[in-house]
Image: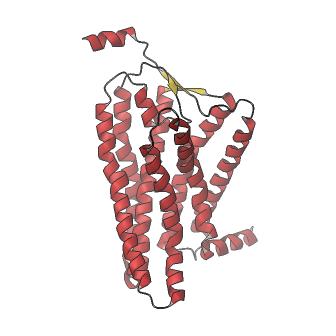
Amino acid sequence: MHHLEDLKNRTIIQDFWILGFKNIHNTKFLPFLFFLIIYIITLSANFTIILLVVLCRHINAPMYFFLSHLSLNDILISTTIQPEMLRIILREGTSITRAGCFTQFYFFLVSTVNECFLLTVMSYDRYLAICNPLRYSSIMDFKLRILLTSSCWVCGIIISLPHIVLLQKMTFCGPKRINHFYCDLLPLLRLSCSDTSAIETVTTINSVPILFLPLFFISVTYANIIAAILRISASAGRRKAFSTCSSHLTVVCMYYGTLVFNYLVPSEGQYSGLQKMISVCYTIVTPLLNPLIYSLRNKEITRALIKLNNMI
């Protein structure tokens, strides 16, 4: 009863104010230009990867098929976060409706979940290629590739839905300021004046299939991969085997490292700025570096780029 009366006395907010980055009043055009260039390069690099996989017939290994889906997912997360962030930088904060905020968070969550699953699928692909090379092509056929990638996308869409359903039912009483550069779950929950235990429980349960199981699976597959590489007698063979999975391992370490660290670091007080910088790593820097890591460290991609450039 007291809780209901308390809610009546509070102002129910229908929109939020995203603060963005602090202390950039006099130099806001520099970060705006910097992040705009990153966004353009990110889109260009990821679209190029997709174009190469579609147009270049000699890039037909399953690894490149999964890489094209990773690039598509990186385009999704970049477009979900960066255009709005650029507007926030220019305006030194911006207002966003409840529906707009929840929509942004939903697509951010879908792309995050999908990336975790895609990286897991790619580790399984590398495991088959190195530990079971004779049966690799027959196991990882086109039908299985389609099944694995579509499962990643569908799981990302379905797993993210309960969060949005629960957020829609919640009441937000303010203050309406979100101390972040996009709508994330933890800043939103701090603004809620209704019970958040249900969504916190869902988040904890979902962290098992989204974070811990993929990390465990990737760790097991790479333990087997490293063991298989060490059994190769020729040093040239070992180098070639390791080079085929080093790009993926780099991306996994970079993505999971920043993602896990962001949710382990306390988000109050002096750590809020640090948390924003870590969020920049996996929402902006990772989608930029993914295609660059794969293209710069992969001879087939490099050759395809040169061939495509000559055709143009």
Vertical comparison of 22 with 236: above or below? above
Q: Is residue 48 left or right of residue 74?
A: right
Residue at 43% x, 50% y: name it: 260
Q: From the top left corner, tell me how far across and down residue 83 is, in percent.
A: 62, 39
Which residue is pictured at 53% across the width and 46% down the height?
Answer: 278
Residue closest to the eye, 310 or 257:
257
* Residue projecting furthest to the front: 270
Residue in view at x 61 percent, y 75 percent: 300
Q: Where is residue 172 in the image (x, y as percent from the top left)?
A: 41, 22
Query: Looking at the picture, how far across and down is residue 248, in whole percent?
Result: 50, 66
Q: In this view, does 49 lie above or below 94?
A: below
The quarter of the displayed image where residue 299 is located: bottom right
Outermost residue, bottom side: 233
| Total numbered badges shown on the rendered structure | 0
Q: Which quadrant of the figure contains the N terminus?
A: top left
Image quadrant where residue 118 sits: bottom left
Of residues 117 and 227, the one drawn nearer to the viewer in this rendering? 227
Q: Residue at x 43, y 25 (%)?
A: 191
Give above or below for 132 relative to 223: below
